[in-house]
Amino acid sequence: MRFQKALLPAILAGGFAAEAAALNIPLHKKQSDVNRADAIKEAFTHSWEGYVKYAYGKDELRPVSNTGSNSRNGWGASVVDALTTAIMMGMDDVVLQQLEFIAVIDFTTTSSTVSLFETTIRYLGGLISGYDLLTGPYAGLLATNLYNAALVENLLTQAVTLADRMSFAFNTASGVPANNINFSTNSSTDTTNGIATIGTLVLEWTRLSDLTGDPKYAALAQKGESYLLNPKPASSEPFPGLIGSNVNITNGQFLDASGGWSGGTDSFYEYLIKMYVYDPTRFSTYKDRWILAAKSTMTYLQSHPTTRPDITFVAEYNGQSLSLNEGHLTCFIGGNFILGGQTLGVEDFTQFGLNLTSGCHDTYNATVTKIGPERFSWNPNNVPATQLLFFQQNGFYVTGSDYILRPEVIESYYHAYVNTKDEKYREWAWAAFQGINKYCRTDTGYSSITNVNAVGGGSKSDVQESFWFAEVLKYLYLIFDDSKEGGFVQGTQEWVFNTEAHPFKVAAK
Ligand SMILES: *[C@@H]1O[C@H](CO)[C@@H](O)[C@H](O)[C@H]1NC(C)=O
Ligand SMILES: *[C@@H]1O[C@H](CO)[C@@H](O)[C@H](O)[C@H]1NC(C)=O
Ligand SMILES: *[C@@H]1O[C@H](CO)[C@@H](O)[C@H](O)[C@H]1NC(C)=O
Ligand SMILES: *[C@@H]1O[C@H](CO)[C@@H](O)[C@H](O)[C@H]1NC(C)=O
Ligand SMILES: *[C@@H]1O[C@H](CO)[C@@H](O)[C@H](O)[C@H]1NC(C)=O
């Protein structure tokens, strides 16, 4: 079913009932949520059509100037990142277009530096997940013929080509990979790497080994990870399970003891429990490390603003001293604790995850746009005079005011909703989407904005990152769609999302 554009204004305004019949919605579904799922699909179609018209083949659309730009090596990041969302939305013609584009990407050359991490989570993740979905629950999406079968098989072929091409990154004295790699020289000038960029490869590279039967990809990623599971020196682990940020790629030793669940460290922790979901047999050590980190986070990093002790945030640290700051990126943490609690059957983790999700919701609910900021603080000693009243009322103040279409808060709403089925989380997700629609939408897509707490959202800064397609629209869609089409049953742990929201079939199932 294609979304009918003319109905969008009425749906966004909340007038659902009358449109249901026109949209041919099955009666057993709750009408408002079906309409909301269709509004998310319309946002996808709007963004996709703008991208195709003005930036096709570039990495992302600039949705204000209507031009394209290449921030991810010019291989068409938005095409590959949008694939799994288009599949799950059932958009067969878009999927076919994407598969034909992907078939001819040349992943072996680029004139710009390649990020091993970004390329793994967006491109490799998108290819592998697209393959898993189209050979699994969505095998019926495309007509059965040799041409389509070849296009699907090609996803795995391209994943292998790309991983083989990047493998030299692991060719260091320790086996800890370099992140910034040069395809002209097959080398890197990096001397250190961060724990998120080292520790957010293992799901993608392990899945590739399991799909191809060639263990070399898993071995490379797991070797790098081994230094993070057993950090040295001991001083780089200031709280049990919570470690430093930067690793010397020559000897695998940590260079610092600062960190948290923020950008640069975040998805290392995320993948510890996700690897256990992926395969509890092979990755039980990863689970043990996640439990240590999770318990330490609850004991040492949990923080409540002086002005709003009812709110739960998590602090960052340098050694054992805390810094009362959080970023939008950190807000995936609620969802990760909920996933951990569900997986391990530990209610405390789930409850803490719900508390953290609620804290991140508070940062959305408090602003003019109903979208949360990129960075915020609750350090009572540093409050800018202009935000004293805001801090008094809301328990935080804004230290980075932009919104670049990040998914993490909505990602936590997804896990909260799937786990509890509490409609409150759907309302929160809908409020976030309405804010994004109101302040970020342009004639051709959705734009980053400069100030979530200014009238009008400040100004539009003209970037539509590929993760808008991969993550924001997918999590929103899954929150409102409960059709379970294609057998993708949520919350059953037969699938695990990579950090870019590309679902992988778990090994154990
Ligand atoms: C790759 O290395 C070559 C040789 O040192 C250099 O000329 C080129 O600028 C590098 N490319 C990038 C993207 O850094
Ligand atoms: C880099 O590696 C690719 C294969 O992955 C190879 O074709 C190319 O010749 C290598 N370039 C250099 C400068 O070694
Ligand atoms: C990394 O370790 C090597 C070998 O011990 C040492 O020579 C180098 O200075 C270290 N690099 C950094 C950035 O600390
Ligand atoms: C979650 O928040 C509630 C209400 O503030 C509190 O009673 C509860 O102890 C918190 N749970 C955890 C696990 O932190
Ligand atoms: C959201 O903010 C409004 C005030 O704008 C407040 O009335 C409401 O209680 C807040 N919701 C939550 C869940 O805190």
Image (cartoon, rainbow, N blue to C red):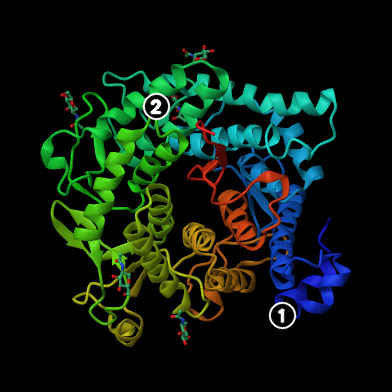
Write down which quadrant ligand 4 falls in.
bottom left
Please, is residue 123 above or below residue 88 in the view? above
Q: Quadrant of the C terminus?
A: top right
Q: Is residue 8 visible?
A: yes
**Relative to 457, 130 lies left or right:** right
Q: Which amino acid type is marked by label 1?
A: Ala
User: How packed is label 1: few (under 14 Cα within 10 Å), some, or many (20 or more)?
Assistant: few
Give how far across and how far down residue 489 sits, in percent.
62, 49
**Relative to 350, 126 lies left or right:** right
> Residue at position x 63%, y 74% from top?
438
**Relative to 372, 284 lies left or right:** left
In-front residue for pair 497/458: 497
Label 2, label 1: how many angstroms apart (C-alpha)? 48 Å
**Which mark identifies residue 221?**
2
The residue carrying mark 1 is 13
Give how far across and how far down residue 53 sits, in percent.
77, 50
Can you tell which quarter of the image residue 98 is in?
top right
Please, is residue 310 above or below residue 212 in the view? below
Q: Residue furthest front?
A: 345
Please, is residue 395 above or below residue 206 in the view? below
Give how far across and how far down residue 202 sits, in percent.
42, 32
In-front residue for pair 82/462: 82
**Relative to 34, 501 lies left or right:** left
Return the disc, 2 or 1, that comes first in the chain's sequence: 1
User: How packed is label 2: few (under 14 Cα within 10 Å), some, or many (20 or more)?
Assistant: many
Q: Which amino acid type is marked by label 2?
A: Ala
Q: Give the structural element (helix, strand or loop) at label 1.
A: loop
